[in-house]
Amino acid sequence: MRSAFALPFAVILPLLAACAPTTPLFVAQVTTGEVAEYKQLKNKRMTAAVEEEGDLLTYSAQAIRDNKSADAEKLYLTGYDNTRYDPEVRAIALYQIGLIYMSRYNDQRDDQKALQYFERIDREFPGTQAAAHADARILMIRQRAREPVQKNARELLADWKPQYNLDLNKTSLDPDMTLLSRRAVLKDRVDEAAQLYLLGANDQAIPPDIREKALYQLGLMYMAPDNPHPDREKAIAYLRRQLAEFPDGELAGKAARHLDQALNQITPR
């Protein structure tokens, strides 16, 4: 999937992986070997889901990994129900629910439920970016229904191989980068992700600490060594904006250090 659409609500809810719920224990009585096998499957599942669908937010991918689709649905709906948020933001909440349920690597996959959420976006938020992306997913679901063979998640995972160019745990990536930022950098889709982070950063209804995080991610993406098209000036501008708007924010110290690094970076002639 080429798209990298997703965000405002990614920031509002758990933008950062650390904000997502912890993974519960599998089953207390399983053997050590079964635990190890289960953990390996779950890590593989999350990576496969993200590779197939670039619009999945960190929290959404973790919900697929941990079989927490219903919990994620409930949390996203709290954002949809908040009418103070921009329509684009509320639409993205519904869009993420649809993506979770349509993921082929989700044991709780439900294409019909996903279809209902995508169609709901068209009805309630026509003209939004989410609506355009939802329409594309509607076509995908309808095409799937015509496929003669329908494999389940475990069968698909058995044959899945990771993409060589999508090492989300690459050591050169800043440890503070979110899943969305990492994928955008590695897939050369930073400008698209930036538009979405800006929706979160510019919406005054979104809590200040979340808007601060959105600006911080913008700075990290544009100065990332793995970014095929890094932009030092943009990184500096976003980090300066973050420090100007949130001088006492929890990320102010980190932003200041990154800003100093960017300002002292030697630009090749």
Image: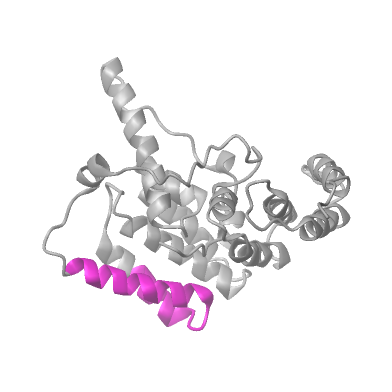
In the image, 165 versus 56, the foreground residue is 165
Q: Is residue 151 visible?
A: yes
Residue appearing at x 29%, y 26% in the figure: 37
* Numbered range of the magenta stretch: 116-145
Specify whether 23 is left or right of 225: left
Identify the main secondary structure in magenta.
helix
**Magenta span contains residue 119:** yes
**Is residue 236 found left or right of 57 in the rendered image?**
right
* Residue at x 60%, y 61% (from the top left corner): 193
Locate the C terminus and report the quarter of the image it occupies. Answer: bottom right
Identity of the residue drawn at 61% across and 65% down: 196
The percent position of residue 40, horizontal first and vertical second, equals 35, 30
Instruction: Please say whether residue 27 is visible from this viewpoint.
Output: no
Q: Is residue 85 above or below residue 264?
A: below
Location of residue 104 in the rendering, given as x and y in whole percent from the top left corner: 29, 54
Residue farthest front in this picture: 269
Q: Farthest top residue?
A: 32
How many numbered dots are placed on residues in this image?
0
Is residue 233 shown in magenta? no
Considering only vertical position in the picture, is 107 above or below 208?
above
Q: Where does residue 267 sit, x and y in percent of width and height? A: 83, 52
Q: Residue furthest left?
A: 148
Q: Quadrant of the N terminus?
A: bottom left
The picture places residue 154, in percent across and down from the top left corner, at 23, 42
Q: Nearer the viewer, residue 252 or 170?
A: 170
Q: Residue at x 48, y 58 (%)?
A: 76
Report whether 177 appears left or right of 257: left
